[in-house]
Amino acid sequence: MTDGALAGLRLLEYGQLVSAPYCAKLLADLGAEVIKIEEPSAGDPARHRGPFPDDIPHPEKSGLFLYVNTNKLGVTLDPSTPTGRLIFQRLAQEADVLIEDRPPGEMERLGLDYATLSALNPALIVTSITPFGQTGPYKDYKCHHLNLYHASGHSSFFYVAPRKANEPPILGGGWVGEYDAGLMAAVATLAALMARLATGEGQHIDISKFETMVTLERIAVSRFANNPEPPPFPGMVGGLVPCQDGHVVITLAERHQWDALVKLMDTPPWTQEENFRDEISRSRNRDQLQPLLEEWASQQRKEDLYVRGQTLSVPIGPVRNAADIVQWPQARHRGFFAEIDHPVAGRLEYPTAAYQLSETPWRARRPAPLLGEHNEEVYCHRLGFSQEDLARLAGAGII
Amino acid sequence: MSRLPLAGVRIVDFTWAWAGPQATLLLGMLGAEVIKIESRARLDHTRLRSLMTGPTLTSPDHSVIFAEINVNKLSLTLNLTRAESVEIIKRLVKVSDVVAENMRPGVLERLGLGYEALRAVNPDIIMLSSSAVGSTGPERTYVGYAPTFAAMSGISHITGPAEGPPTPLSGAIDLRVGTTSAFAILAALYHHARTGQGQNIDLSSTEAVSTMIGDTFLEYTMNRRSPGRAGNRDRIMAPHNCYPCAGDDRWVTIAVATDEEWRALCSVIADPRLADDRFSDGYGRWQQQDDLDQIIGEWTAGRTPQEVTQALQAAGVAAMPTHDGPSLAEDPQLRERGLMEWVEHPLAGKWLMAGPPWRFSKTPAGIRQPAPLLGQHNHYVLHELLGMSEEEIQRLVDEGVVN
């Protein structure tokens, strides 16, 4: 078995919470060796966010930390100390990529900015992930996922049903916008690695989480940028439909899909009415159609609708929660969830990857690192510090 | 001009709608030559209509949505039901690096253009197939679009007010899937560049969205509990909400993470009610957040989102306007960094659109040319890439192979 598409690449991650760690994890999943650098003692704040088994906080048992840091090595280091800075520079000298998420200017103050590091290692790629990028009037603004998600327009753009005016816009679930930035940063990092194969040169990548999210709504954004008052969107016929035991969504992108839905409903007379004759009239008369559709669905169960509908080629999907998805036979068949054994958190099932690469498959190589777990391996075995040095570095609070 | 990261990479692109085209949009911005395989008999529906532009278009070359998500790409029109078209595709695959598609699983195989058939003509080809739930497994033939990916991935269930229904999502959901595809293709290209080995990539759109709420599943596997909806609230931080502002349907978000930020917020709002002891630590604030939100909301209601943002950010508190389309278009940060660019399409017209989501210091990679007219590059592909004569091309047109 091969060691993965990115085997042999060495990455350094100096990141917290989701975006930068997820970027590094995506690359680690495919075989890159990632050394994650955490602050001594507290470590990555994700360690303190949970979820935790039985809701008992423990820095080695945070579900968020475990998920976004699988397949990495972990060291502790305080780069604000002179020795810490030198150690960081030595690690960067031997790395192909540094992924970092410090506020703009901080790496420079630490003596660890791209200009300094590239002088030591011209082939180094530095990927900087920040809320607003390295420049511009917002570059020093504080920003959490809440602020990011709403600022980038995602809570204002609705395609399936129009948002009701004067109701609070709603945050996307979990940390989705932070994952977005991590994924886009991984795309850009791989592109820079491809460029480096040809030129041998590294470079600096500036990823703005805000801009990443704006580009993920590029079609809605430019619609308004080019026409401040575009025609209102009436909502999608079908869309979110309540049923007996939850909700389904139905999308009708093509004519034959409406025909299939009519068949699924056993062709009730109202479906033959003039008002619902074609796509345009159905869309125009959506307010009449939706209650009829909902009345029918209210007698149905979501998973039953899914299977019977899909058998007729209706693009229908049940709204599922985590339990439903972990138990979903299709996901089980594809091995989407895999058990990973962690020395403190124990054996747990994790989502793997959505892509199945035939020659270089996703693999759990190691669980997320304990805080400072690989200090000895990295500092002694690679950088040549002795065990005594290690004790002194720890005593000085450097590691 | 500097060399683009994917200069020299050629992609045969069968994708359509939004998710697949986002993958090749990103790869095209990075410098790959993307050849979109189209057919007049079965057009990419974004050429004719969209959820958002209203009436159906009559020309395939005037859609601004198609023009946006297909910049930099080339267009070759072929009738894929013709055996000769299949041979042309194979000749093209022979001189290409990647094939990308998002048709229903099995469709390309039936046309004789599945991975095994293409690998026979180009052993190190990389092929990505993106489908609703993957091209293996008992449900592989099931179909879906962004709203079903969102529903089945788990994200709709955890998005929405605590007391309300789940939230149907679209738009960005598709582009998340496409970005995941671009990542997988890039990893395969990197592997190929070093080993010469190609591979097949089977991507599930639903799983792609699930991975972006992956920690949700850890909550279940740890505690056999499925996270629900929490509106705009956080499990630790408070205040943490979207507050009403002056104006019509205007909002601002505020999130406080530390005691220091809390004190800064209090000094800006200067409402004596906030000095109450029950708000003095993070736990108390979380417990009392309904009351807290009421007081903060009264303060924001008399101010614009920009006024609140500037006042709070100056004091070190995270706050941002909640943008809708028009306010985003005027955002000073995006303007200063020039995210939006003018692109001139010969028929769809001049259009302001977002450029690339990254800034490279040495290999700027973005918009180079507008989206193709239908069949615009037939001659380039057939003549310059495949070496066909003018007569041969004319015959293919006359016989409806090139359509």
Image: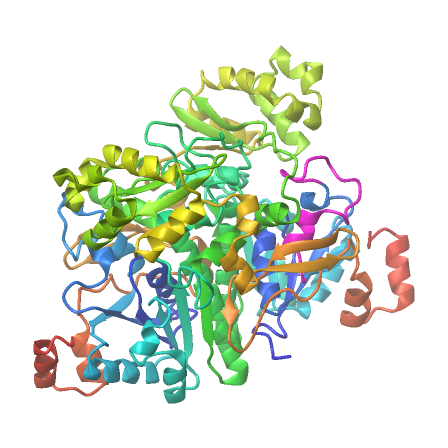
Q: Quadrant of residue B397?
A: bottom right
Which colouring convention does the figure follow? rainbow
Instruction: Give the number of marks.
Output: 0
Residue B403 on image: x %, y %: 82, 51
For residue B386, side relative to residue A293 (left or right): right
Is there any visible trace of residue B347 in the rendered image? yes
The residue shown at (22%, 76%) is A80
Q: Which residues are magenta?
A: B49-72
Residue A376 on image: x %, y %: 16, 78
The residue shown at (67%, 63%) is B72
For residue B278, side relative to residue B380 (left or right): left
Residue B67 drawn in magenta: yes
Toward the top, the furthest residue is A269
Is there any visible trace of residue A334 in the rendered image? no
The residue shown at (44%, 43%) is B304
Residue B71 on image: x %, y %: 67, 59
Judge by depth and name the residue closer to the eye, B208 or A241. Answer: A241
* Main SS, magenta residues: loop
